[in-house]
């Protein structure tokens, strides 16, 4: 029996152990998609306790606690931070098979030197030890990032954001990590949502002109893209919960836009036409500026009406959508390709049934001499598990080149989540090691080492021109 989460955790063979220790373990990190707060990074936030660092805003943990029958008082309610921590410890102790179990204990081990398992019996002692460390300057937000060997991270930012803290960080020569914005224009595309009109009003304010017609709206969007670019942004991100494509002229989209601003109901076809034209407009901008476009596909959001009204979005009540994506996605990419305006693009799916769809789609639009120009992105959200990561990489390898994969990201709001890169890297090395041990690939350590270092860091560094 192997020891619990020892130095060979997730490494099942000698080749995997060598690949991890000699090539993966010490590679830097480029976290090209996360939800960390630039304000908290700039202000070098210190956490009052482990609950604030772990449980504030972490809907992964919240879901598990609800499944365990924990009252909402101890999740998002007014219970004390200590009681919330104890409720989490109670839940974690039985979370066998859930990646939260491995992630949590990796964080305890790597950041705090704690190798005890977290449960109701050990929780009080762990609470005291971790909180004592968090009170020191060595465990502030910036220090946690630096000790994780992060070189660059990209936050997630609305086009109307002032990027105040990114600008301040850009001038701060004492912090060696690149903290860059990422352009997230979801509200610009969600013309059918109640948030659309108020958001266009905010856009008009930062643009300095009214955006009461579609031409000015597009001009304002382009202005914000250029502003983000000046602050160092090189990547956009889109939540494509429903993948749709409908041909439209600018004139048609302009009429649809005007109709929406008047509060008139839009048909499904009108919504699709507006989204398609606007997204294609954005794609062309990204291509012109050399940006990377990310499409996160197939989330089914805010499914629990009562809890949405109580807590709002991103609180643990989202699921996987099972709509067809192959044809509309291909049409979108092809429409940009035919105009020689397809940017580097990363495609993620929340539904593993679409793994091979994305893996084959990316192969249809490669080119321009760019290794892996179109990427099948890392296993995302509900797929961010051992099995999910393996299946994503097997799909990519089976019909493409896993060696050109740009690897892992945290997609997290937690400064402690960088151990997920170690979790991922161990799985990568074990998968490659199995293929070698099975005689499916030669034990050529020079080639294997280059592949591992590429997936861990080098491919992303080249891809994002960082």
Image: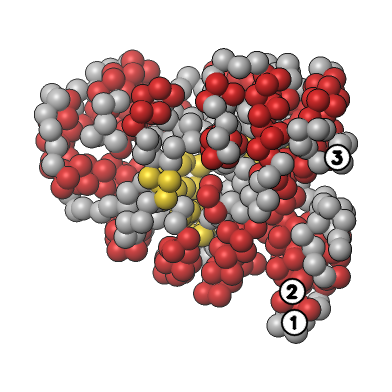
Q: Residue at x 59, y 48 (%)?
A: 464
According to the picture, the residue beneath numbered tag 3 turns out to be 116
Name the front one of labels 3 and 1. 3
From mark 2 to mark 1, how far is it between C-alphas? 6 Å
Q: Give the Cα separation between the discs numbered 3 and 2.
A: 30 Å
Q: Dot 1, crowdedness within 10 Å: few (<14), some or many (≥20)?
A: few
**Which label lies toward us, 3 or 2?**
3
Q: Is residue 356 left or right of residue 278?
A: right
Give the mark nearer the N terminus: 3 vs 1.
3
Look at mark 2 in the image and give the residue it sits on. 434
Residue 361: tell me if it is visible.
Answer: yes
Say which of 260 and 178 sits in front. 260
Observer-nearest of 436 and 279: 436
Q: Earlier in the sequence, mark 3 or mark 2?
A: 3
In percent of width and height, residue 281 lies at: 31, 44
Q: Residue furthest bottom?
A: 439
Report whether 377 appears left or right of 7.
left
């Amino acid at each position: 029996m192997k020891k619990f989460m020892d130095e060979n955790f997730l490494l099942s063979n000698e080749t995997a152990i060598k690949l991890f220790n000699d090539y993966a373990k010490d590679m830097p990190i480029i976290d090209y998609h996360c939800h960390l707060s630039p304000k908290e990074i700039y202000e070098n936030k210190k956490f009052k306790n482990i609950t604030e660092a772990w449980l504030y805003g972490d809907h992964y943990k919240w879901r598990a606690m609800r499944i365990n029958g924990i009252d909402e008082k101890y999740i998002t309610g007014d219970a004390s931070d200590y009681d919330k921590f104890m409720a989490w410890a109670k839940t974690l102790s039985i979370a066998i098979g859930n990646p939260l179990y491995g992630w949590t204990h990796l964080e305890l081990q790597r950041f705090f030197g704690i190798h005890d398992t977290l449960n109701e019996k050990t929780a009080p002692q762990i609470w005291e030890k971790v909180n004592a460390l968090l009170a020191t300057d060595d465990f502030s937000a910036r220090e946690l990032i630096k000790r994780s060997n992060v070189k660059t991270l990209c936050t997630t930012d609305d086009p109307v954001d002032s990027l105040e803290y990114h600008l301040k960080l850009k001038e701060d020569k004492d912090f060696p990590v690149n903290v860059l914005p990422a352009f997230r224009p979801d509200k610009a595309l969600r013309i059918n949502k109640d948030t659309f009109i108020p958001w266009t009003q905010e856009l008009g304010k930062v643009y300095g002109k009214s955006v009461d017609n579609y031409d000015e709206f597009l001009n304002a969007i382009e202005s914000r893209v250029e502003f983000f670019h000046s602050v160092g942004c090189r990547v956009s991100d889109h939540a494509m919960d429903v993948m749709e494509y409908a041909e439209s002229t600018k004139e048609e989209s302009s009429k649809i836009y005007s109709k929406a601003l008047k509060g008139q109901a839009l048909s499904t076809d009108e919504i699709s036409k507006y989204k398609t034209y606007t997204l294609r407009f954005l794609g062309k901008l990204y291509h012109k500026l050399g940006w990377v476009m990310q499409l996160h596909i197939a989330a089914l959001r805010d499914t629990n009406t009562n809890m949405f009204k109580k807590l709002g979005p991103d609180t643990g009540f989202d699921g996987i959508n099972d709509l067809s994506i192959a044809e509309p996605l291909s049409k979108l990419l092809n429409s940009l390709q035919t105009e020689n305006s397809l940017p580097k693009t990363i495609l993620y799916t929340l539904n593993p049934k679409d793994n091979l769809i994305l893996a084959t789609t990316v192969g249809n639009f490669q080119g321009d001499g760019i290794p892996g120009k179109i990427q099948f992105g890392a296993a995302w959200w509900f797929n961010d598990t051992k099995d999910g990561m393996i299946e994503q990489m097997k799909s990519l390898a089976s019909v493409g080149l896993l060696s050109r994969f740009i690897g892992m990201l945290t997609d997290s709001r937690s400064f402690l989540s960088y151990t997920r890169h170690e979790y991922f890297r161990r799985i990568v090395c074990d998968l490659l090691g199995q293929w070698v041990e099975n005689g499916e690939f030669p034990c050529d350590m020079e080639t294997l080492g280059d592949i591992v270092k590429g997936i861990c860091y080098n491919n992303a560094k080249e891809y994002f021109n960082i």
